[in-house]
Every structure is written in C-alpha cells, then in structure tokens.
C-alpha cells in the first residue's frame, strides 16, 4: 500500500509569505490560521517505515517536525526514515530544503542530470557530502526503483517524464550549468506501488496540458497537479508582480485551456491541486473560485493530509 503525506501545498514563499500583505496572507496571519501552508512537497512510502520525499522545500525542517512518520526512531540518537529525495526541478522551492539535511544522515538524491548540474555549480550544496548523500541521475521516460538504505528495493517504481515548463527562474538570461535545450528541467512523476500495481502522478509545475499528458493521467487513482494561480494574469492584476503564470511555467486553474477545463474529462480518482500561490483566491473557503474548484471535483489539501492507495 502506498502512503502519501502532503508535507506542504503552497508555492514559493508559502502562506503567509513573509513580506506579503495580500488578502490571503493577512487572513492567514490573523483569524484564518487554516490558510497557513508550507511550500510544496510530499512524502511517499510503500512500507510505512522508509519514506521518499518528492522535492525538498525550504520549509523541510518544519514539515518533518510536524510529520511523526518522518521522526527519528525511538531510542536512536541519529536516525531518519527518509531514504531518499526525488527532485522534479531545480527551483529554490524544490531544492533549498536539502540544506536542512546536512547533518550526516545518509540518503540518496535522485534528479535529472540538468538539476544535478545546478547543484554541482553551487558550492553551498557541497555540505551534502557525497559519502553520505549519493547523487543518482534519473532519465526521462526511464523507470527506476529507489533503494532503501541497506540497498534493498523499496517496492516503489518511479517514472519521470518531461512536462511543458521552463528552467529555474534564477537562471534566466544565464548559461545553464548543463547547457543544452532544457529537456529535463521540469519533470512529472508517475509513482507506482509494485506490490498492488496502484499508482499516482505528481506535477508541481506544468505550463500546459498536452494530449500526451492527458493520455498519461487518464485512469490514475490520484493526481497532484500544479495549482499555482487561478488566472494567468493574477499577480499583475493584484499588483503583486509583473509576470504571468505562463511566463513562470505554470498553467492557471481556470479559463480556456486551464487545468480544470483541460483535465475535466479524464477518469481520475482524486484530483489535488498543490504548489498554490498566496495570491490565488481559490485558497479562500467560500470564495467563488474555491466553489468552482470543488464543484469540478478538485481538492486543496491542508499540510499533513495523508492519502492511502
């Protein structure tokens, strides 16, 4: 059985964002603490003992503290149930949490070579000594089984695949450490329990829904999907920024060709939005946008939500 815990559902900066006074952040700080959310990541396990993180958010220490299955085993001075971290991109909100895992516990880091090249190019990530933290390249459309600390198979099969998107924003206008055309900068994952055959999909970033992507997702028991913005010009309209969702590599929830419309006819068991920006009015319970999300069969999870497959 696969166990999946939503460690965080927010986009970069979390909710509330430290320097933001938008309606959602104001409410989250005052009379609506249920709006508070850490930055997007999940943990998955096939045996309930060993866990793999999908992305390592800047809020990782807080997320681990709030998640008992990720606590050290009782009676051991140094231990972690986290056997590995699987990265889907090189954005800050996907990799910065790695720096909170520098205290010497072994785990394996799985990422596309383009993302590994970014980590190698920044010496601060050398605090993750490769004697303890093995860096394992993964390839597009090539399934792999992450290993347990003793080298035994985990019972989980992960299939990375390319998703329409873009490279990390902090590399805009600069040469990518890996060179090339960007293939592998943004990945989706299919995560399968080899024992039961059940699987789910994880896409923290997606710029558009293609026919190929719809074909992949059809029939899945569970899909985590990019819910960054409600409308493409959301940040501009709210006076919070100058970029559209598309220019940042994120599809909108609403509108023609948005996620809700594009994925409406797929036979998916449970549809969950994550990587939700603090500007997104769908976070507000009772709002027209939240009603539209729920009427379309989508869920916006709280941190700590667990789903079993």
Image (tube, rainbow, N blue to C red):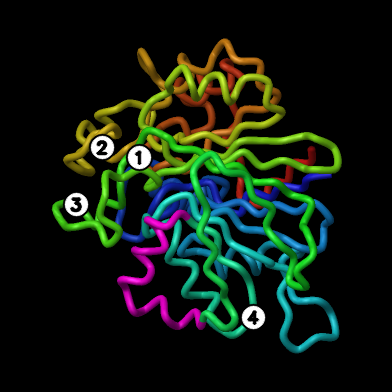
Total tally of numbered discs in the picture: 4
Cα separation, mark 1 vs mark 4, equals 37 Å
In the picture, the disc for residue 105 is 4
Question: Could you tell me which secondary element the residue under label 3 belongs to?
Answer: loop
Q: Name the residue under label 1.
A: 279
Q: Which SS type dominates the magenta stretch?
A: helix
- Camera-near label (3 vs 2) is 3
First along the sequence among labels 3 and 1? 3
The reply to whether callout 1 and callout 2 are in contact (CB within 8 Å) is yes
Residue 164, image x, y percentages: 37, 33
Cα separation, mark 3 vs mark 1, equals 23 Å
Q: Which of 10 and 288 is in front in this view?
A: 10
Q: Name the residue under label 2.
A: 235
Q: Mark 3 points at which residue?
A: 172
In the image, residue 67 sits, relative to residue 197, either above or below, namely below
The reply to whether callout 4 and callout 3 are in contact (CB within 8 Å) is no
In the image, residue 72 sits, relative to residue 260, either above or below, namely below
Question: Could you tell me which secondary element the residue under label 4 belongs to?
Answer: loop
Q: Where does the magenta region start and end?
A: 112-129
In the image, residue 37 sits, relative to residue 132, either above or below, namely above
User: Which residue occupies 36% across, 31% down?
Assistant: 207
How packed is label 1: few (under 14 Cα within 10 Å), some, or many (20 or more)? many
User: Which residue occupies 77% across, 34% down?
Assistant: 198
Cα separation, mark 3 vs mark 2, equals 19 Å
Question: Could you tell me which secondary element the residue under label 1 belongs to?
Answer: loop
First along the sequence among labels 4 and 3? 4
Residue 70, image x, y percentages: 71, 66
């Amino acid at each position: 059985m696969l166990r999946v815990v939503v460690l965080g559902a927010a986009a970069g900066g979390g909710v509330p964002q430290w320097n933001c006074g938008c309606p959602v952040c104001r409410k989250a700080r005052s009379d609506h603490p249920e709006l508070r959310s850490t930055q997007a990541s999940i943990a998955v396990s096939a045996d309930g003992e060993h866990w793999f993180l999908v992305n390592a958010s800047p809020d990782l220490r807080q997320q681990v503290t709030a998640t008992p299955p990720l606590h050290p085993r009782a009676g051991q001075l140094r231990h972690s149930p986290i056997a590995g971290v699987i990265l889907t991109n090189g954005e800050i909100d996907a990799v910065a949490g790695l720096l909170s895992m520098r205290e010497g516990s072994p785990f394996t880091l799985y990422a596309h070579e383009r993302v590994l090249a970014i980590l190698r190019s920044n010496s601060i990530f050398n605090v993750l000594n490769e004697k303890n933290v093995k860096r394992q390249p993964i390839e597009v459309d090539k399934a792999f089984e992450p290993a347990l600390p003793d080298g035994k198979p985990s019972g989980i099969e992960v299939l990375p695949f390319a998703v329409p998107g873009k490279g990390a924003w902090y590399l805009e206008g600069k040469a990518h450490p890996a060179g090339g055309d960007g293939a592998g900068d943004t990945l989706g994952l299919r995560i399968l329990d080899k024992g039961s055959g059940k699987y789910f999909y994880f896409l923290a970033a997606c710029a558009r829904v293609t026919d190929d992507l719809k074909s992949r997702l059809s029939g899945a028991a569970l899909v985590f999907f990019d819910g960054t913005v409600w409308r493409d010009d959301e940040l501009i309209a709210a006076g919070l920024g100058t970029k559209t969702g598309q220019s940042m590599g994120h599809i909108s929830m609403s509108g023609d060709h948005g996620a809700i419309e594009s994925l409406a006819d797929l036979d998916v068991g449970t549809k969950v939005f994550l990587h939700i920006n603090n500007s997104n009015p769908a976070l507000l319970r009772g709002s027209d946008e939240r009603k539209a999300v729920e009427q379309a069969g989508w869920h916006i999870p709280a941190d700590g939500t667990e789903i079993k497959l």
